[in-house]
Image (cartoon, rainbow, N blue to C red):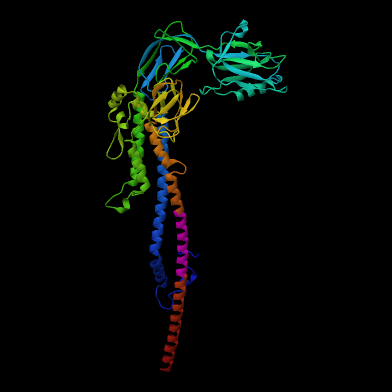
Amino acid sequence: MTSVNNRPEILTKLGVGSGLDTTALIEALVNAETEGVKETLDNKEIEYKAQISAFSQIKNNLKTFNDNLEIIQSNNALGYAGSTSDKTIATFTVNGNQASQAVNSSLTVTSLATAHTLTGPSLPSASSTVGARQISISFGTWSADPTQGGGQSHTSNGMSTITVNPSSTTTLMQLRDMINSAASDSNSDGEQDVTATILYDGSNYMLSLKSQFGAANEMKITDNHASSPVYAYDTSDGAQLTQRVAGTNAAFTVDGISMTRTSNSIDDLFAGMTLDLLATSDSAVTIKSEVDLASARSAITDFVTTYNDVMKSLQSYRESDPTDDERNGLLAGDSLLRSIMNEMRNSSGTAINGYEGGPYYLSNMGVKTMRDGTLSFADPAMLERQFKNNAESLRSFFKDQIVSDNTDIIPKRYSVADTKPGSYAVSVSSGTATIGGVSTTQSGSLYTVASGDPNGIALEINSSNTTGTVHYGRSFITLLQDKLDTFLKFNGLISSKVDGANKRLSALAEKQSNLEDRIASLYSRYETQYSAMESTIAGLNETSSLLENAFKRND
């Protein structure tokens, strides 16, 4: 291909016969045939590159906004702050699982919950073999320590029995790993039923087994080795292992009421609050939960600020000047930009379902939508009024939830994809349950819904006849993030838009290359034609000069 700005040497020879500026004439003819097409292609190139640049920046802005939403959501700014008069005895904090409440109570800690801990036997090395045997570990409550003589009994708590089968070559380290691998989480509390470690006492190595906290999680261990059941802790083979710590419950009083728990971390005493017991106390300490909306106001202010920054950025790409087409926004009239802005605006009016006393709206927090699509947090007092009327309303802005108002009905799981946010009545009669009016399938105490609005909800129900309500809610922030994800995800709408523009840009480059080839061809054709014309005229001029000279000689 010949560049249009570097014409062949032949152009310097044109015009020598006719006297015309044939170079300029050819340039004008080529431009007349191609200038319109070239301008269209150049404008398209500018347009596609502007789209790619603009939407890449928009995606980056939305991603930053989404990251800020994550930070705001994780701050637990739910309107209450907990405290204790002695942090060495206990801590009292908001947990975000339910709306909190005002608390001012006295606490005395009598004993802490402990985990049943057994050790033994002593071995010279962690690589020593333990011998071929079958070891089974079950969990429950001992009537008394088996080391205290006969007559003790162990009552199972229903957790799964763990069985391992070391061989004659299994080492102490391998036995530890076998037990940890076999251990399950029978009660679905996020912790395995037993943890095995190896201790070194300065002289010997020994296996250490620790159950979950609480008196109901003590271990019974059988060892089928006929002559040396050294890993047994039961009534038939005796307490071969040594009990280091008995499994006990935490014992404490709150406002004079005696209570026990299997764990030192207690989240069912006061709704929305977690009490962590750290030490026993000779005298009462004070635990408090007080209204503290400062962090909530700050979080909502941060949200409004970042939201408005994004909306103003989007608006700058869309704005156009009706008096000057040259001053139109880069994406004026773009349907995807319009869709993004509409989804952002619509989010402020979205109903937040699945929270007690709802549905709630962003306006319940004192946030208003302005005419230009931005938000205003001009009435923080409304947030306080709404919160004091129903603390759950603030939670609907920050936190997702699935909660039950009946302790016999325990939510175990839901489906983000299939479960529709809402409040669902639960009815259990003779062991048959419905959730939100939809029949369930039963597996033991677990009841699961596979259709309708509550599709995907699974509940553990510990009563054959009871009723209650389960609230499943997705917060305002989560709902907004869902909308953003439509645009931001790997194969989302913005990526598709940018990919499409890149493809059109590639196709445009090919058209521009073809146009350059066409321009070069036109130059070549016109140059050939005008070169022939100039040669003819030059020949005629030469003949004319010869004739003229001949006539002059004859005169």
Rendering quarter of residue 526? bottom left
Image coords of residue 182 (percent x, y): 61, 24
Please say if 241 is above or below 59.
above
Please say if 455 is above or below 461.
below
Report the side of 135 relative to 382 (left or right): right
Report the side of 441 relative to 208 (left or right): left
Whether 508 is among the magenta residues is: yes
Q: Quadrant of the C terminus?
A: bottom left
Report the side of 414 relative to 163 (left or right): left
Residue 239 visible? The answer is: no
Residue at 46%, 5% in the rendered image: 282
Residue at 42%, 41% in the rendered image: 486
Report the side of 128 relative to 47 (left or right): right
Furthest residue to the bottom? 554
Q: Nearer the viewer, residue 299 or 433?
A: 433
Overall secondary structure of the magenta section: helix
Q: Nearer the viewer, residue 336 or 28?
A: 336
Q: Nearer the viewer, residue 172 or 299?
A: 172
Q: Nearer the viewer, residue 362 or 304?
A: 362
Residue 106 visible? The answer is: yes
Whether 113 is among the magenta residues is: no
Furthest residue to the front? 430
Q: Which residues are magenta?
A: 504-523
Rendering quarter of residue 437? top left
Image coords of residue 183 (percent x, y): 59, 23
Image coords of residue 353 (percent x, y): 35, 31
Residue at 49%, 15% in the rendered image: 264
How many numbered marks have been drawn onto this rendered protein structure?
Answer: 0
Image coords of residue 536 (percent x, y): 45, 81
